[in-house]
Image (cartoon, rainbow, N blue to C red):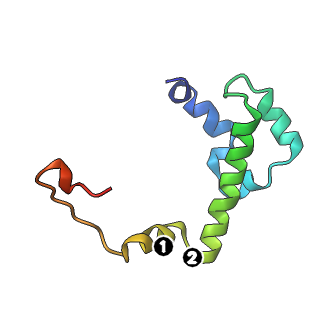
Amino acid sequence: MTILRKREHFREAYDGFDPKKMARYSERKITGLLADPGIIRNRRMIEAAIGNAKAFLAVQKEFGSFDSYMWSFVGGKTIQNSPRRPAEIRV
């Protein structure tokens, strides 16, 4: 609930979650985020968000798009599951 209540401020603080902008965050930007009472001020969380943005961009570069990467796990086809009992649910 804490994050949900602060969602809009997170969006503003993290530049609309634009991965290109986030991947370029400097120590100065991190210091600013650590001082922002509208978000959860945890250095490791902030650094993880920056690292995730960099990883997202790397995946986009390698696969052409993030959705191409995701679809590669299922051969580009939607998996239709119709389990009749819990034991049939795929892990």
Q: Position of residue 50 (x, y in %)?
A: 72, 49
Residue placed under numbered mark 2 in the picture: 63
Does residue 7 appear to the left or right of 41 in the view shown? left
Which element is circle 2 on?
Answer: helix
**Displayed quadrant of residue 3:** top right
* Residue plotted at (13% across, 50% down): 85
Pointers 1 and 2 in contact (C-beta within 8 Å): yes
- Which residue is at the front of the view, 83 or 70? 83
* Residue plotted at (79% across, 55% down): 24
Mark 2: amino acid: Phe
Distance Cα–Cα, label 1 vs label 2: 6 Å
| Quadrant of image for the C terminus | bottom left
Residue placed under numbered mark 1 in the picture: 68
- Which residue is at the front of the view, 12 or 19? 19
Q: Residues within 10 Å of mark 2 (few under 14, many from 20)?
A: some
- Which residue is at the front of the view, 34 or 43? 43
Mark 1: amino acid: Ser
Which element is circle 1 on?
Answer: helix
